[in-house]
Amino acid sequence: MSNQDLERGGTKARGNQNPAGNYTNPYYVETSEHQWTSWLIPMFVVANIAVFIVAMYVNNCPRNNLKFEGACVAKFLGRFSFQPLRENPLFGPSSSTLEKLGALKWDRVVNGNQGWRLITCIWLHAGVIHLLANMLSLVFIGIRLEQQFGFGRVGLIYLISGLGGSILSSLFIQRNISVGASGALFGLLGAMLSELLTNWTIYTNKAAALFTLIIIIAINLAVGILPHVDNFAHIGGFMSGFLLGFILLIRPQFGYLEGRHLPATARVKSKHKAYQYILLLVAVVLLIVWFTVGLVMVFKGENGNKHCSWCHYLSCVPTSKWKCGN
């Protein structure tokens, strides 16, 4: 992995923060909704691991390594051994292998008509460390959400948020490749935040829940300003998931479910509050505008940095310890 390659690895802290455990369960007071069995998120984890194994098989370091950066790591693994640490310190394949298998590369998307890379890149990882950090985060966040809202809604948020992250990344990161599921993971975090806001009336300890979630999100976004981390994918995924949460994770207001069992003559609460419908409508409009404008700009070859001279600081802030380069 060269120094110019980007992994969407800003979710590393989530594996240790366990945001799902801190947020979703203790504050919710409505108990009569159906609890789903989580199977899609574990399947996503298996799929990501399987794709990484395939990437290492294709990489075949002992055969393809030119030894300019040193010898392969863990040679006892045979063709599954890792690239030299000077090339890829995350214990993974080479940049050329990732690009061959579908890493996000602006030139390939725009000039090579390979728009499918906007999706395939979210299933690739730069190395074992990158993979473990993201999969731990996915387990902690995704399983709890899937148990509460079902595989359909959570799966849509994951995939659409991953696409949203790839779109924003393509607009601002145009000289390097980018891989990782962190855009999709940030989408789940964004959906958790909007779910809390739109279902505000059914939660207790609301301030504590909101504060906890905002701190977790801020820490993970802050990690993204380190060099070689694609924070634009994180931000794009977060924005997409935040809007999707208002649309897909809306809950009935407190007391509605119990009210369905009252006599027909009894006054039953409306299923949702007016502000929930307003937030849903606004989110639908913004989501359509965001994806339409974003995709048009990507395939027209627009460079987001020309329209926003300071936005590059969102992904890397230079210090005395490191430089951001391109």
Image: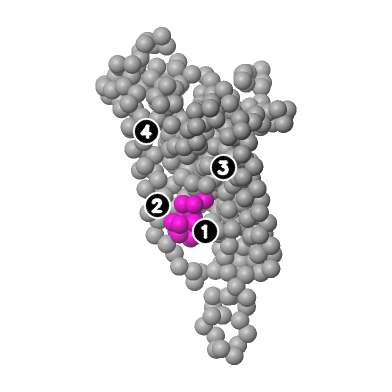
- From this view, report whether residue 272 is shown above or below residue 57: below
Task: Assign a secondary structure to mark 1.
Answer: loop
> Which residue corresponds to mark 3?
164
Image quarter for residue 216?
top right
Mark 1 and mark 3 in contact (Cβ < 8 Å)?
Answer: no
Please provide percent x and percent y for residue 314.
Answer: 66, 32
> Which residue corresponds to mark 1?
25
- From this view, report whether residue 153 is shown above or below residue 98: below
Residue 189 visible to the viewer: no
Residue 208 or residue 302, whichever sits in front: 302
Q: What amino acid type is highlighted by mark number 1?
A: Asn
Q: What amino acid type is highlighted by mark number 4?
A: Phe
Q: Quadrant of the C terminus?
A: top right
**Mark earlier in primary sequence (1, 2):** 1
> Which residue corresponds to mark 2?
40
Image quarter for residue 50?
top left
Q: Write the residue at 73% across / 28% down.
A: 309
Please provide percent x and percent y for residue 165.
Answer: 56, 39
**Distance of mark 3 from mark 1, alpha carbons?**
28 Å
> Which residue corresponds to mark 4?
52
> Is 64 in the magenta?
no
Total labels: the figure holds 4
> Which of the labelled discs sits on residue 36, or is there none?
none
Q: Residue furthest top?
A: 68
**Distance of mark 4 from mark 1, alpha carbons?**
32 Å
**Mark earlier in primary sequence (4, 2):** 2
Rate crowding at label 1 as few (under 14), some (14 to 19) or many (20 or more) other CA atoms within 10 Å: few
Task: Assign a secondary structure to mark 4.
Answer: helix
**Distance of mark 1 from mark 2, alpha carbons?**
20 Å
**Mark earlier in primary sequence (4, 1):** 1
- Left/right placement of residue 301 relative to residue 51 reads right
**Distance of mark 4 from mark 2, alpha carbons?**
18 Å
